[in-house]
Amino acid sequence: MTISYGLALGSEEHGPRRLVELAVLAEKSGFDFVSISDHFHPWIREQGHSPFVWTVLGAIAHATESIEVGVGVTCPIMRIHPAILAQATATTANLLPGRFVWGVGSGEALNEQILGDHWPPAEVRLEMLEEAVDLIRLLWKGESTTYRGSYFWAIDATIFDPPPGEVPVVVSAFGPQAAELAARIGDGLWTTGTGGEPVDVYREAGGEGPVYAQLTLCWAEDRDEAVETAHRIWPNTSVPGQLSQDLRTPAHFEMAAELVTPETIAEAIPCGPDPEPLLESVRQAVDGGIDHIYFHQIGDDQEGFVRFFDEEIRPHLPT
């Protein structure tokens, strides 16, 4: 198993120009890929940003030359109709030929309920996701498409600039039902952390594609500073999974995060200048079957983290 390493472009923490700068930094530093989220809101207001990902991707395509660019992940079932996303992804694939990867998932109310739509239960959202991916793949053929599904319609819709090649669709999963869906309809699995049940279920269900996962950390030269930064900016890392899907606003996440202490954050993620906790997380992820690991550095000092990564982490990584 060959391992690829990436940098998370934290669109909740950085504005659009800064995200492009970070993509360039990642490419120059030798990362294999970058991942950027597709959100309408940040998790909490302290994070402060959430630009429109499809505009940012165009700028990244212009500013970079070879690095793989992944969206991790889009929910194609509510906020934006799948036919529009078929066009957006086709255009992006033309701008990033051979290096665009699209992650999809069943979404969070935080981002998908902004238009006032009913928030379906998870099993219905997974049905909607499967249908959306089916419609999008039909539209990518560049032919006139009429589609009447249970959740989505398209009438005589044609994408005149279809993708120039295959676009990998990597399906997000944190539970067994979604992992089975990823194995059935996806070209890979998108998850978080160091593996566990979703990866096992995905493989057992016949999934053969790559597995992407994010490792969250906060590097700083002083550990106490790193813990403070992580607790201030990213306390949502300790908000449980189902709750994080159903809370509707950043204010609601702030209320939930009031229960998260600095000590909880310090135990949950690597903080500070010691490389060993992060290297141990990487080893656990590799042992857990993850082959595309990307690092989310919390806070403004992305350049400091990249220097730390180059000097203290990269020489010891499994390959």
Image (cartoon, rainbow, N blue to C red):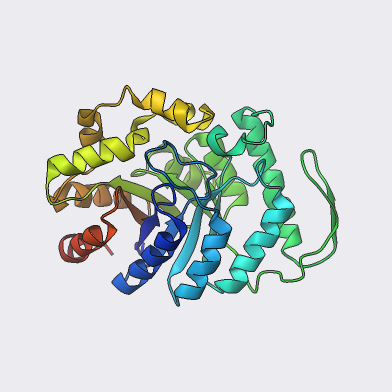
Identify the residue shown where x is 72% and y is 71%. 161
Q: Position of residue 165 (x, y in %)?
A: 63, 72
Q: Identify which residue, 82 or 127, lies in the foreground.
A: 82
Could you tell whether 270 is left or right of 101 in the image? Answer: left
Could you tell whether 212 is left or right of 137 in the image? Answer: left
Identify the residue shown where x is 35% and y is 55%. 293
Label total for image? 0
Identify the residue shown where x is 52% and y is 41%. 179
- The image quadrant of residue 48 is top left
Above or below, 199 against 6 in this view is above
Above or below, 30 against 238 in this view is below
Q: Identify which residue, 46 or 304, lies in the foreground.
A: 46
Q: Position of residue 129 (x, y in %)?
A: 65, 43
The residue sitting at the bottom extreme is 65
Q: Position of residue 197 (x, y in %)?
A: 42, 37
Q: Identify which residue, 145 or 96, lies in the foreground.
A: 96
Could you tell whether 270 is left or right of 274 in the image? Answer: right
Residue 136 visible, this orientation = yes
Q: Quadrant of the N terminus?
A: bottom left
Q: Position of residue 209 (x, y in %)?
A: 50, 57
Identify the residue shown where x is 38% and y is 55%. 8
Above or below, 243 against 224 in this view is above
